[in-house]
Image (cartoon, helix red, strand yellow):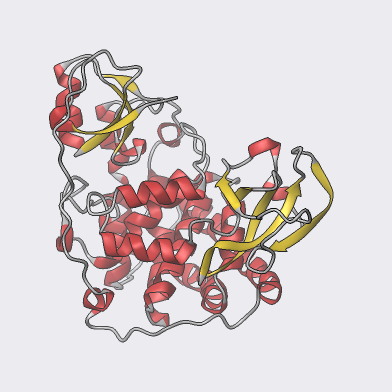
Amino acid sequence: MIEVEKVYTADLKVGMYVSGLDRPWLESPFAMQGFRISSEDELAKLRELCQYVYVDLQKSRATLELAQRKLSQRPRRPIESLFSQRTLKSYRDRAEWADEFPRAREAVQALSEGIEEIFSNVSRGGSLDVLRVRKSVEPMIDSISRNPDACIWLARLKQQDHYTYQHSLGASVWAVALGRQLGLPRSDLRSLAIGGLLFDIGKLRLDQALLRADRPLTEEELVQVRRHVALGVDMVRETGLMNQDVLDMVAHHHERHDGSGYPAGLGGDQIPVFARIAAIVDCYDAITSHRAYARATSPSAAIKMLYEWRDVDFQAELVEEFIQAVGIYPAGSLVELSSGEVAVVIAEYRTRRLRPRVMVLLDADKQPVADMHTLDLKEQTQTAAGEPLDIVGSLEPEAYGIDMTGIQL
């Protein structure tokens, strides 16, 4: 059994094996698969970058003597206090999954095609067409407002495609889903959608080979990658867009709650609230997508990571609202049932997060079923043999060779 311990960086020693950070590996110069601390310089870098890390005890060559510390637990703030200038509302599902899915499919397809055309034009040196961006997001906002599950499912399928474009699509969908959960008005959902699409636009002005590198980046290369923030702000401002919430998302989506982010090292309430949202959706979409340097993390594992990073990287209240928005098993998650069958989540019940509606793909022997069928775990609580029927765990994307893009509903 692998023994992993959470260790504050002040307690690290040379010889300890670091298997995880308190933030995505993307934001560090270290090897993705973990590493053994070999020098005081590496210790200094870790202490500068992280508050805590995860240490593999079996691979470590140093005695682990840990100070028992706990992250500060500050009182939770009501969400309304974050949006004091806005009137929040409660959204209710106004469409069933079956009715919403075809409309969501059209909306996501139109958005995907719009992103590709817009970004391709920018990559060729053209200007950013903000009017086209705004037009492209409207059907997606409509769909998520009615019922977010269908768009969430489709955004997850799109993560198998071109990462740069589809990361923007995914971030836009997650941002709107979180905005809906928060009760933000339509105008704010539009700002979140546009900001989610554009906060990484500056990467189109970088060396694409650097972005596709499947190795740890050097310090100099990290500096180059971080230029995408300033480049993106300039590109958006050149269009004449005056929406401050969108500009905040582009300018500050890499700031972190504890002040360890960039470019300005802002922390806590210094970070504009729409940028705090952008930081969460950027991270979530990145770690649940296949990238050149890392395989995708399962949605439930990504949610656990975000929960660990609350009040360190991200504001706790917004992390908790995001978890409510997308759920422990979001639409598109592969799960294993207590029957041994493998299924994909197609819709959640926001009152019964652990018992969603699923489509069975593999039988108990992990063989494709002859006829894929749905199970409503809210209603069906037992197998045909009378045994309890539950989700026992989330699976990694593409587990058992499943190709999600080939699933027809």
Spot occupied by residue 365 in the image (x, y as percentages of width and height): 76, 37
Name the residue located 39 percent from the left edge and 80 percent from the top edge.
187
Q: In this view, does 317 lie to the left or right of 116?
A: left
Name the residue located 49 percent from the left edge and 33 percent from the top edge.
292
Q: Is residue 207 left or right of residue 265?
A: right
Name the residue located 66 percent from the left edge and 73 percent from the top edge.
103
Q: Between residue 139 and residue 49, name the one nearer to us.
A: 49
Spot occupied by residue 55 in the image (x, y as percentages of width and height): 30, 27
Q: Between residue 127 and residue 102, name the one nearer to us.
A: 102
- Placement of the N terminus among the 4 image quadrants: top left
Q: Can residue 90 be seen? A: yes
Report which quarter residue 127 is drawn in: bottom left
Spot occupied by residue 400 in the image (x, y as percentages of width and height): 68, 36
Q: Can residue 190 be seen? A: no
- Placement of the C terminus among the 4 image quadrants: bottom right
Name the residue located 60 percent from the left edge and 52 percent from the top edge.
391
Total tally of numbered discs in the picture: 0
Report which quarter residue 70 is drawn in: top left
Report which quarter residue 368 is drawn in: top right
Spot occupied by residue 210 in the image (x, y as percentages of width and height): 40, 32
Q: In this view, does 42 lie above or below 271?
A: above
Furthest-right residue in this view:
370
